[in-house]
Amino acid sequence: MADSDNLLETMTSSYANARGFLARANAIYSAVTFKIARGKPEESIADLAKKFRLDASQQQTLFELAAAKGGPSFIDEKVQDMNRAAFHRSAFALNAFAQLFFVDLPSQVGLSFVYLKLALVLANMALAIYAHVTLDWTLDDLIAGPNALPPKRRFFGLAVNPRYNKAVKNRSRPYAREAWKEKNLFRTAYFINAGTIFFGTQFIVPLERLIFPFGMLFGKIIGLIATALTAFDIWRGVKAGDDARVAREREVSVYRDLNI
């Protein structure tokens, strides 16, 4: 009887540990594959509330925005920005991992800068953190809603309202910041990662020190990983340029409302 009780207790403990591990693994997977549902505003708001743990007042603000004119398109635009920022976060974290374990550029090209590897890893981690922070910024912009423009003219239309053009310029700043970030920061970082991974691929342990056939197998696997990561970074660099162009077009479209 005692043996049965011990067996049951062991199985229960193992089951609890397994559930805890699966829950942590699922949390990590959800964070890595972060993506807000697009489509109906109600679905996006429900997903936002789940992932960001929005309170009742914040959710009510978003539902009111969804019911307003232009609200659904504004919500969809910000959801796209969040999904793109989350993708950047995962991509740069992956590049940091690759730079740490699969890239040794100084030994490959004969550089004496021993801290170059560490600098590349830390730069990618910094970009991943920056992309993560922009998620919160975008959420704040979403909850704040689109900037309501004051009237173009005042005093019964007899005088120009200087606050109008100032409000338009303020409305364009997030798009200008997004265009600069995508083109000058993220695109450049992706291309640098692609170049360093392509030219500096080497496992953290020299392959010649591994017992045969592990050295050969690791060499083939690392070559495939490096090729895939290089292609991925080139694709994301090109895509970042396209995203910058879209953001610039949105900025220009806002400036068309200037009262000149």
Image (spheres, helix red, strand yellow):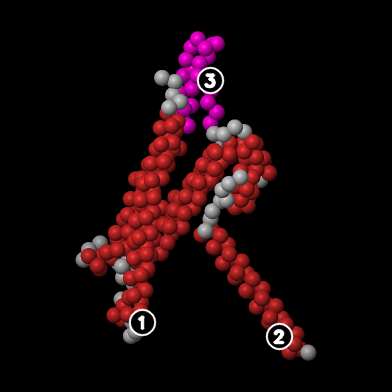
Between 15 and 123, the residue placed more toward the observer is 15
Residue indicated by mark 1: 214
Q: In this view, does 137 lie above or below 1?
A: above
Question: Is residue 19 found left or right of 1 in the rendered image?
Answer: left
> Are the residues tagged 2 and 3 within 8 Å (C-beta)?
no
Measured as percent of width and height from the top left, residue 44 is found at 60, 47
Q: In which quarter of the image is residue 206?
A: bottom left
Residue indicated by mark 3: 151
Mark closer to the chain start, 1 or 2: 2
Between 217 and 126, the residue placed more toward the observer is 217
Residue indicated by mark 2: 7
Q: In this view, does 137 lie above or below 29?
A: above
Q: How far apart are marks 3 and 1 (CA)?
A: 72 Å
Q: Which quadrant of the figure contains the C terminus?
A: top left
Q: What span is colored magenta in the figure?
A: 147-171
Question: Is residue 238 found left or right of 199 in the rendered image?
Answer: right
